[in-house]
Amino acid sequence: MIVTPAVGQHSLREQNIALVARAVVDAAAPPSRSDIATSTGLTRATVSSLVDRLVEARIVAELPPVASRRAGRPAVPLVPARGTLVGIGLEINVGHLAGVVLDLAGDTLASETLHGDFHGSDPAATLALLGALTGRLLATARADHASLRVAGVQVAVPGLVEPGTSTLRVAPNLGWADLEVDTSAVAEHTGDALVTLSNEANLAALAQVPWQGRHVDVPDSFLYVSADVGIGAAIVLDRELFVGGRGWSGELGHVVVDPAGPLCPCGATGCLEQYAGTDAVLRAAGLPRDAGVRSLLAPARRASGADDPDEGRDGPAADLPPALPAAPASAASAAALDRAGHALGATLADFVNLIDVPAIVLGGAYSDLADHLAPIVHAELTTRVLSAPWSTFSVVRAPVAGAAATVGGARQVLRSVVEDPTAWL
């Protein structure tokens, strides 16, 4: 028999202060102390005492009092503090290094993307570049917020990460395997803040979950799938990441489409990445690898007069990007996109048959191609999913598209502060 220990006074206090912190951070509108007492069931005196501690720790901030028609003192709205505690999200990927600094209010204090070819790169040299990028990010953030504290750092990588360690088991498209990732170049700039290694797709999926009471048009359960050179996926159930028994779920890119297909960098043949990864689609369209997936639709974009949603941006796009024209640039592009869409849709149908998620969220390069890919994927789902006659499916563009893994990583750090504020009091 498992005996649950009694909750002591100290533990109860920790639980209550986390409850109050969540009530402020997750509120759709700034609550008052009275509002929090009502929503949590705590006494007003307890809430007031806990709020005072959170304000003193610069986790929560007070807005100017709001006059009320009722008798008594004006209500003081409470909000997450700006520019005090920050989370840093970093990413190592085949074509770029990226980073973002977010504060508890959700503001981006600094962001940067460094483009390059990191396939087969020397890990030490790449991590040195990432450390330098971290230094630049913090210098920018501290220019306006000199006293900010780093709550933690999440480093996203496109591969299998041993849970709770800095061991990268394999990242086929980087060419890295069985590597103890040395993050000392990052820690040099972040002091004693914990630096954690995580899977890129998992963090990018968490970036799509509503944050701080903000509504986004994504259901509570979905399968996130994104493309770069490789294809990553993550399962979110009731707004929580499902990582599997060993923390390695979501390797959609290495599901076999055709056992007799082309060789994949992972060592197998016929993986989905060889049909629907960005390199594969560009190659099938007769375009060079460095052309970028938007070249598949570029003429249609120019004819439409639509602005490039990422033009002039150096960091993550926090809002839903404008819809892109669906028309491919050429017959070869159309054929390549159709081939990718059918391969992707058939593979996703297998996932839906297995885990019964109602929605597919297209991120990364797929967000740019969503207008063309989504109808094809949806058709495959309705054809191949056994429950289709009694089900509905949605295939949508990711609300957070650019550098989503960095946003998700930084938010995870900040969420840990909200869930356990006592370490910062």
Image: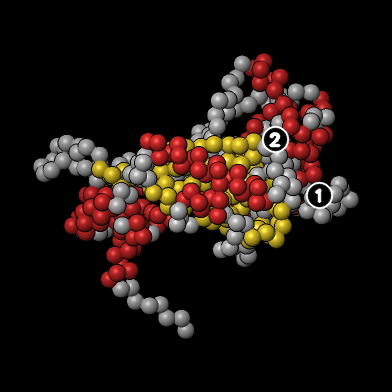
- In the rendered view, tell whether residue 401 sits above or below residue 418: above
Q: Kindly identify the residue that appears in the image at 58 percent across and 21 percent down.
A: 307
Whether residue 352 can be seen here: no
Mark 2 — residue?
373
Residue 286 locus on image (x, y percent): 83, 29
Q: Quadrant of residue 45?
A: bottom left
Q: Kindly identify the residue that appears in the image at 70 percent across and 23 percent down.
A: 298
Amino acid found under the numbered disc labelled 1: Cys
- Which label was assigned to residue 264? 1
Left or right of 194, for residue 244: right
Q: What is the CA distance from the residue labelled 1 to the residue labelled 2?
A: 23 Å
| Nearer to the camera, 182 or 393 | 182
Q: Quadrant of the C terminus?
A: bottom left
Precedes in sequence: disc 1 or disc 2: 1
Q: How many marks?
A: 2
Disc 2, SS: helix
Q: Kindly identify the residue that appears in the image at 61 percent across and 16 percent down.
A: 305
Whether residue 65 can be seen here: yes
Q: Kindly identify the residue that appears in the image at 36 percent across and 52 percent down.
A: 22
- In the rendered view, tell whether residue 258 sits above or below residue 333: below
